[in-house]
Image (tube, rainbow, N blue to C red):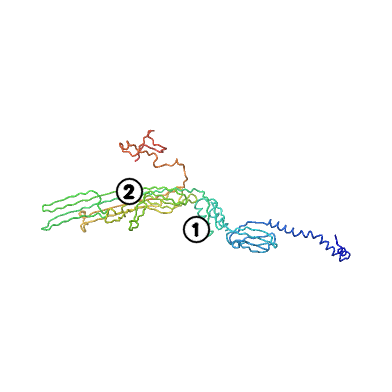
Amino acid sequence: MISTFQNRLFKTGAGRVIGYCLLALALLAPAMALAPHRAVAADLAYDLNAETRRVTIGLNKSLIVELPRHAREVLVSNPAYADAVVRSSRTSYLIGKKVGQTNVFYFDGKGRRILTLEVKIERDVTDLQQMFNRHLPGSRIRVEAMNDNIVLTGRVISSADASRAQDMAARFIDSKDGAKVLNMLTIDSKEQVLLKVTIAEMQRSVMKQLGIDITALGNIGSKIINFQTSLPFSVAGQMLSGATAGFTKNFSNGSSVGGVLRAMERNGLLRTLAEPNLTAISGETAKFLAGGEFPVPVGRDDNGITIEFKEFGVGLTFTPVVLSRGRISLKIATEVSELTNVGAFTIGTTNTSTNLTVPGLKVRRANTTVEMSSGGSLVMAGLIQESTKHNLNGLPGAKEIPILGTLFRSRDYQNEETELVVIVTPYVVAPTSRAKLARPDEGFVQASDTEAVLLGRLNAIYGLSSKGKPPGPYRGGYGFIVE
C-alpha cells in the first residue's frame, strides 16, 4: 500500500519520478535480498567441482599451466621441491627443483579455488630408455623412476646384458655403488654352467751313476803309503741303491790294491691326471677341493706353537658369466698339489721326539680368464720342461786322462722331462632326471667271506649268466676285465 506522502509525490512531475524509483526499489527489495545467497551458493558449487590433477615433472625441468580463468593467488606447499613462476594471471610455470612430492593451489580474486595440482618430481628417464633400446637391442627393458631411484624391469638375453643395464643406470643417476638401481630384470637364457677341467702331466726321468773307488796300500822302504778315493755323486747327493763289484790284489811285499765299481741306472715315469667337474650359476663363484689340509706353524709363544692348516689336493674355483649368443666368460683358478720332501723343513729341539716336520708342496697351478662357446674346449695352460744335470767328480789331472781317467772319476747324470696341459670345457646345462645320472659305486657288490679268503677277491665278479648279472640298471658290457 502506498502512503499519503507517496501520493503527494506522484501529483507533481518530479514527484512522479521519485515515486517510481521508490516503487521500483520496494518491488526489487526481496530479489536483492536473495541475490547474495545465490552468489555464495554458486561459488561453493564451483569450488567443490574445482579440478584436481596429478602431474609428474622431470628433475630440473618445467611444466606450463594454463588456467580457465584469472588467478589472483598461487600457493606451493613445499617450495623446496617445486617453484611456481607466474607469467600472467592465467599462465604459470612449474619448475622441478628436487626429487619428491608437493602440491600447488590456484585461487581467483574472490578466494575461490580454480585448480589443484598434485605434483611429483622425478628423474626423467627418457634418455636412459633410448640408450637401452640403442645399445641392448635384443632386450626388452622398461625404466621407471621411484623417488631418487631407478627400477629396471623386463627381460634380457643374458646376465651380461643385465649387468650392463645396471651399470648404465648407475652412471645415469651418478650412483657409484649402484645402490639406487633396483634390478628386477629377468634373464631368458640358461644360467647353469658345468665346467670340465682336465689336468694331465707326464714326467720322464733318467738317472745314471758310474764311479770307481780305489784303495792302495804300499811299502816304499820304511814308509807306508796309503791311497784311497771315495768319489761322491753330487747330483743325487748319494748313491742310488744298485750293483757294486769289487776286487783286491795282494802282493808279496805286503802291498795291496783294491777297487769298488759302483754303477746305477734308473728310468722313471710319472703320470698325473685330474679331471674335476663343477657346476655354478652365472655370475656366482663355485669352489671344489679333493684333498686335505696339513699344519703349518705360523707363530710361537709360551703356550706352544700356533699352526694354520693349508689345503692341498685337486682344487678348482671358477666364476662363469653367460654372455649373448651362447658364449661364456670364465674366471678360472685350478691347481693340483701334493706333499713332498723337497723344500720341507724340521723345527727341532734337543728332544728329537718333539720335532715338527713341515712338508713342502709340489703345485701345478693356473689362474686366468677366458671366453668360449658352450661345448668348446680350450687349453688354458701348458708346459714343456726339460732339466739336465751332469756332474763329473774325480782327482784333478788324473780324471782327464783318456780311458785310464775313468778309474779316478765318478759320473752322475740326471735328465727330467715334464709335459703339462690344462684343458677346460664349459657347458650350459639344465637339470635332468635322477634316473639318468650314474654313480661310481653302481654295480659294486662286496665279496663274500669265501671269495675273499679262498680266492683273494675284494669285490664280487660277474659272469655272463643271468644269475651273475650285477644288480640295478647296469649299462655297458660286464663280466670282463680290460687291461
- Neighbor class of circle 1 (other Cα within 10 Å; few <14, some 14-19, many 20+) is few
Q: Picture quarter containing residue 396?
A: bottom left
Say which residue appears at 54% left-offset and 59% top-offset.
Answer: 173
Q: Looking at numbered disc 2 in the image, what kind of residue is underneath it?
A: Leu
Q: Residue 40: horizontal and vertical position, in percent?
A: 72, 59
From the viewer's side, name the closer residue of 118 and 374. 118
Residue assigned mark 1: 177
Q: Looking at numbered disc 1 in the image, what kind of residue is underneath it?
A: Asp
SS at mark 1? loop
Q: Residue 175: horizontal and vertical position, in percent?
A: 52, 59
Mark toward the viewer: 2 or 1: 1
SS at mark 2? strand
Say which residue appears at 33% left-offset and 48% top-offset.
Answer: 270
Tags 2 and 1 touching, CB below 8 Å: no
Image quarter of the N terminus: bottom right
From the viewer's side, name the closer residue of 5 and 203. 5
In this rendering, position of residue 26 left or right of residue 284: right
Q: Picture quarter containing residue 81?
A: bottom right
Mark toward the start of the polypeptide (2 vs 1): 1
Residue assigned mark 2: 270
Q: Residue 282: horizontal and vertical position, in percent?
A: 47, 50
Residue 289 tag number: none
Q: Residue 108: horizontal and vertical position, in percent?
A: 69, 62
